[in-house]
Amino acid sequence: MKTKIPSVDLQAEFREIHSEVTKRIQAVLAGGRYILGKEVQEFETNFARFTGVKYALGVASGSDALLLGLMAFDVRPGDEVITTSFTFISTATAIARLGAKPVFADIEPNTFNLNPNLIKNKINRRTKGIIVVHLYGHPCRMDEIMRIAKRHRLFVIEDCAQACGATFRGKQVGTFGDMGAFSFYPTKTIGAMGDAGAVIAQSKKLYEKLKSLARHGEDGTFHSYRHVRIGVNSRLDELQAAVLNVKLKHLPRWNRMRRALAKRYDQLLQQGTGLKFDLSPVLVQPTETKAAKSVYHQYTLRVQNRDELRNYLSEQGVASSVYYPLPLHLQPCFRYLRYRKGSLPQAERASREVLSLPLYPQMSLDKQKIIVSALRRFLSWLGLKSEVDNSSKQFILNKL
Ligand SMILES: *Cc1c(COP(=O)(O)O)cnc(C)c1O
């Protein structure tokens, strides 16, 4: 194994910000205020400004951000919330934890995001809201989704865990719906050094309710010990906020680098195999729709023989990832919802075909070239597969 190429490289990121982060953390440690101090305050102010909303609230994780959002809309047993099946588990478990029913709609094959037309079919009297997910950093079709939500008076929570900084028609994700939920898990486009998250909102009333819910339902004054609703404990802490304050300044540049790397993957892949086989049926590159500006949290291909490719890349020292191998409607924990195999064909197909290539802002051109040539070798072999026997296949592989 000559080279080792990881999916993400947080050490390389840390090298860029080492002195800034260390200084801030030292100051927090020495300052003695570890909960709800000035780092959190600064982050909330700057994060609201960054996304272009009035209010931002730091919370303990992206999963909590979703849960708090649903609690703020009083989601309870008997309610239904429509969401995508092709996402991380916590998008849907947040709904289930409140005793409500997650209702899964299928995705669009090109963006892997919720298909607005299929949301419509799932709406009934019990439907209270929609959680959209901007998967892999690519924004959903928010204009259509908001039209549907307004017509049926549904709340909309945007799960922006993978898409911090992405825009749709020039506007940041998280600002279309009633609320945006963000995760700062270390590998997200902006990550803390532990668990962290945030919610953003335009409405003061909603913000204050979210804040109260995250502080055990307190009446608005911290440590008043007067509780007006049943809440939870979910706070962003000073150390994580200190890290995020440093990283937020770098985020626009890092997101530009992600986009540049994605473009370069596009170009390298389009250069073809140099062989006479047409590989387009076996590989589909990610698309970016016209109104959307993705932050490429993932650069995700669709490939036939996905698992074989993944093994081959791994043998070549190239890491790759599958987000997600099992759609949520088929997860054991949601068996009680009684979805059958085949009920959401696009999500199921995506889970068999997706493969994310390594992508992080500090990645070099050399690494991308190594990855793409390994991919080409495999694809050429696929093209040849039907026509030659195993020994010649190996011979050809060695030559490529
Ligand atoms: C990461 C992620 C979450 C959960 O965030 P945590 O901070 O890990 O709780 C939720 N939804 C999506 C789409 C995610 O990618």
Image (spheres, rainbow, N blue to C red):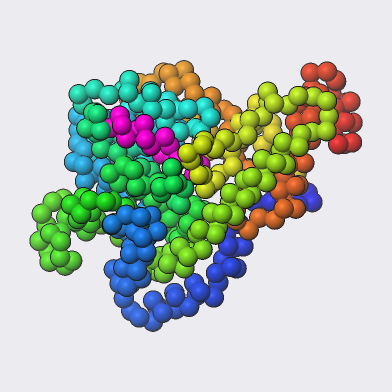
Residue at x 69% of width, y 31% of height: 308
Residue at x 18% of width, y 52% of height: 205
Q: Is residue 139 magenta?
A: yes
Question: How far from the left and from the top, in percent, is residue 180?
Answer: 34, 47
| Front in this rendered view, residue 351 or 141 | 141
Picture quadrant of residue 133? top left
Above or below: residue 211 compared with residue 80: below
What segment is highlighted magenta in the picture?
Answer: 133-149
Above or below: residue 94 compared with residue 105: below
Question: How far from the left and from the top, in percent, is residue 68?
Answer: 27, 48
Question: How far from the left and from the top, in percent, is residue 213?
Answer: 21, 53
Residue at x 44% of width, y 78% of height: 26
Above or below: residue 258 compared with residue 301: below
In this picture, residue 13 sits left or right of residue 313: left
Residue at x 60% of width, y 68% of height: 15
In the rendered image, is residue 329 in sight? Answer: no
| Front in this rendered view, residue 49 or 368 | 49
